[in-house]
Image (cartoon, helix red, strand yellow):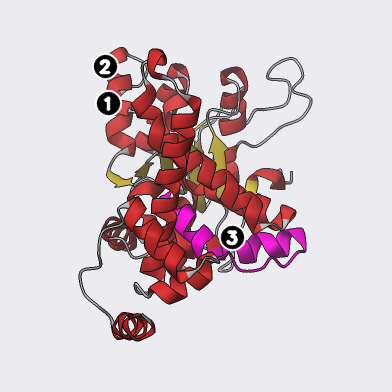
Amino acid sequence: MEFNKTFVDSLGTDSLPDEQTIFGSSISMQEIRRKADRIAATSIPVLIRGESGTGKEVIAKYLHLHSAVSKGPFVKVNCAAIPGTLLESELFGYEKGSFTGALETKPGRVEMADKGTLFLDEIGELDIGLQTKLLHLLQDGHYCRIGGREDRRARIRIVCATNCDLEKAITTGTFREDLFYRIDVVSLHLPPLRARREQIEVLTKHFLHSLGKKFGRQAPPIAPTTMGLLQQWNWPGNIRELENWVARYIILGSDDVLSNELNYRIAANSVEPVYQDRQSLDLKRMAREATHATEKAVILRSLQANQWNRRKTARELNISYRALLYKIREAGVPPRKRISPESSSDNHNNARHN
């Protein structure tokens, strides 16, 4: 019987971004890269932890492609997306006639992953009863289809992922402690995107290329000022949220739409803590402070992008040089720590014109 190919992902080397895009240059992600490279070739279970949208599935695929079973299938199971009553049959399969509606024999995802990798996403959502069966699979490497009479051998590498606090789930009795220690032989903790902002530009360019091909549209490069805004936003949805933003930019084809909404969100986020007391609400004052905070952020980012050359910055921001100087003073932008050759020339020219 043929397997349901919908759930089997036979990965090629072009199925993932390049390693620079995946890991970036932050210290934390470089450490994850070194750790991943050390454990990829082994068969030990790996637990990938991190907030939703941080790229846990990408790391799981990276481990698969660098493992001894890289030529085998990569099979993903989202434990949160499949109801508990159906998940057992999806995992282990069933024999014909084993229950009402079982009109033919069906292999499960464990069987589909033979000589490959089984990726269990959102493992913290797994039903407690199924946790026991998964524990047995990890312990002796065997399983049985529903309605089956003989055990089958599982020749698979298991990688799990979660955004849950599994230690807390253990204390509340919703996750088995013995299963936790079976899947947590090695842990990889992915930091949120806000903790590795230097990766945002690389990821944005990657999504511009990949989503542009997907949508059949070639979007113009994102302006430096908008890129600065992208690097300022906290990205609560992490990489997935960034991908959605780039998709919107490609579809709408407008840098203004992207930058305006980012400006609004950054400003709202920066002033929200000030107005906890509803008695102090003043719409005009809030708008002034939001505008002030946004201008300061944009000016600072643009100055940094132009090595503190104020004339270039003024041209980029489409304002006069004198207007920029005024806004720098008004926004309280800190002075640069050292003067670049360009900036020295900038100051010399300014003195000569004055």
Q: Residue at x 39, y 52 (%)?
A: 296
**CA–CA distance in space, label 1 to label 3:** 35 Å
Lower position in the chain sequence, tag 1 or tag 3: 1
**Farthest left residue?**
337
Give the SS element for disc 2: helix
Give the vertical position of 138 relative to 189 (above or below).
Answer: above
Say which quadrant the N terminus sits in: top right
Give the vertical position of 346 relative to 157 (above or below).
Answer: below
Q: Choose between 190 and 62: the one closer to the eye.
A: 190
In the image, residue 211 lies in the stretch drawn in magenta: yes
Q: Viewer-nearest of labels 3 and 2?
A: 3
Q: Amino acid at mark 2?
A: Thr
Residue marked by disc 3: 207
Residue marked by disc 2: 171
Residue marked by disc 1: 167
Please identify the dominant SS of the magenta region.
Answer: helix
Q: Viewer-nearest of labels 1 and 3?
A: 3
Q: Is residue 171 visible?
A: yes
Give the magenta part as a residue range.
205-232
Left or right side of 153 for 350 = left
Left or right side of 303 for 16 = right
Q: Are marks 1 and 2 in contact (CB under 8 Å)?
A: yes
Q: Amino acid at mark 1?
A: Glu
Q: Position of residue 141 (x, y in %)?
A: 41, 39
Q: What is the crowding at mark 1: few (fewer than 14 residues within 10 Å), some, or many (at least 20)?
A: few
Q: Position of residue 220 (x, y in %)?
A: 66, 68
Q: Residue at x 40, y 52 (%)?
A: 297
Q: What is the crowding at mark 2: few (fewer than 14 residues within 10 Å), some, or many (at least 20)?
A: few
Say which quadrant the C terminus sits in: bottom left
Give the vertical position of 211 relative to 285 (above or below).
Answer: below
The numbered disc on residue 125 is none
Left or right side of 335 for 10 = right
